[in-house]
Image: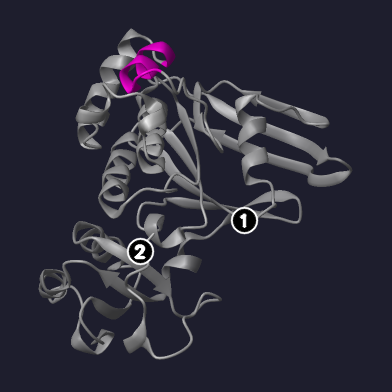
Amino acid sequence: MRISMSLSIHNISKAYQGNKVFENCSLHLTNYGQIIGLIGPNGSGKSTLFKLISGLSFPDSGVITNSLVTSKLIENPGFMLNQTGIDNLKYILNTKEFKNSKEIVKQFEMEDYLSKKVKTYSLGMKQKLSLTIVLSKESDLILLDEPTLSLDHKALSTLLKILKEHSKTKKIIISTHDIPSFIHIFDDLMLIKDKKVIKGSINDIKLKRYLIVVREFVEFKKNLNHLISEELSKNLEAQQIIIEFTPKLHDQIFEEIIKYGLIKAIPINSASLYFGNFNSFPISNAW
C-alpha cells in the first residue's frame, strides 16, 4: 500500500527588498504522479516558489510543510568545472542514484562526454548533465525551472519522454515560458497571479491554433493525414503548417510533432501571434 505524503503551503508571504512576491498564498499537493505546468510572467515568483518548497529560502510568514523527497533544477546549478562529468555524478549522487543515471546518460547520448571536464561542456551539455542529476535522484517531487534552456530538439524530445515515464510515480512541476513544448504532457496547470498560486485549466491553453515548423516535414505531414482533415491544415511552404488542435487530437498530434523534430510551435490566436506573411516565417532561428 502506497503511503500518501504531501506538500502544504499555508498563508505564506514573501518579500524581497520590500517588494512582495507572495501574500497569503496557500497550496496543497500529494505525491501521486502528475506533471503540472507552473505559468507566470517574469518576476512573478516561479523560481522563488521552487526555492521555498525545496528549503533554499524561507517565507516571511506562514507555514510550509513538505514530506516529499524533493529534487530540483533551479536557475544555474553549480558544478566542479575542473572535474569530469562522471566525477560530478559520483560526487552528487548516491550509489543507487548513480546507477539510475546511467540510463538517462544513455538516453541523452552523453556517454562520450562524461570523461571530459565539465568546463569544456557547451551550455546544452551542462543542461543535460543537470537534468541527469535531478532525474536520477530518488525523489517524490521534481521541480524544474526552465528545463529546456540550451537544449536542441533531440534533447528536448528525450526529456519529454523521460518526464512522461517519471510522472507515473512522481509529482513533477515545470516552470516554463516554453508552453508549446510541454503542453501535450501537462496534466494540470498552476498560475501565479496577484501574489498567489491558483489552479488553471489545461484546456485554456490546449484550444489553440499553432503554426508548426518541423525538420522532417514531408514525413511529418504524411503521418498526420490520418489525424487531421485537410480543412484543418494548410501547407504554406516546406516545413510549415498551421494546425487547429482539438482536445481529442491534441496529445496525439504533438507526439508526432516532437518525433519529427519540432523547431517552433507558435500559438496563432494568442499574444504571441506572428504578424505578417506566414510564407516568410523564419525557420532558421530554432531555439
Residue 113's image quarter? Answer: top left
The residue drawn where x is 29% and y is 54% is 153
Figure check: 158 above or below 287: above
Residue 139 placement (x, y as % from top left): 43, 23
Q: How is the image coloured?
A: one colour
Label 2: which residue? Answer: 286
Q: Is residue 245 visible?
A: no
- In the visual, does 265 lie left or right of 80? left
Figure check: 269 above or below 129: below
Residue toward you, 50 or 75:
75
- In the visual, does 26 lie left or right of 113? right
The rendered magenta stretch, by its main secondary structure, is classed as: helix
Figure check: 47 above or below 141: below
Q: What is the three-letter code of the residue carrying label 2?
A: Ala
Residue toward you, 184 or 203:
184
Q: Is residue 2 visible?
A: yes
The residue drawn where x is 25% and y is 66% is 253
User: Which type of secondary structure does the marked residue at label 2 adopt?
Assistant: loop
The quarter in which the C terminus is drawn is bottom left
Residue 214 placement (x, y as % from top left): 25, 68
Residue toward you, 225 or 46:
46
Nearest-to-viewer mark from 2 and 1: 2
Residue 282 placement (x, y as % from top left): 36, 77
First to last magenta residue range: 83-92
- In the visual, does 206 lie left or right of 161? right
Label 1: which residue? Answer: 40
Rate crowding at label 2 as few (under 14), some (14 to 19) or many (20 or more) other CA atoms within 10 Å. Answer: few
- Label located before the other in sequence (2 or 1): 1
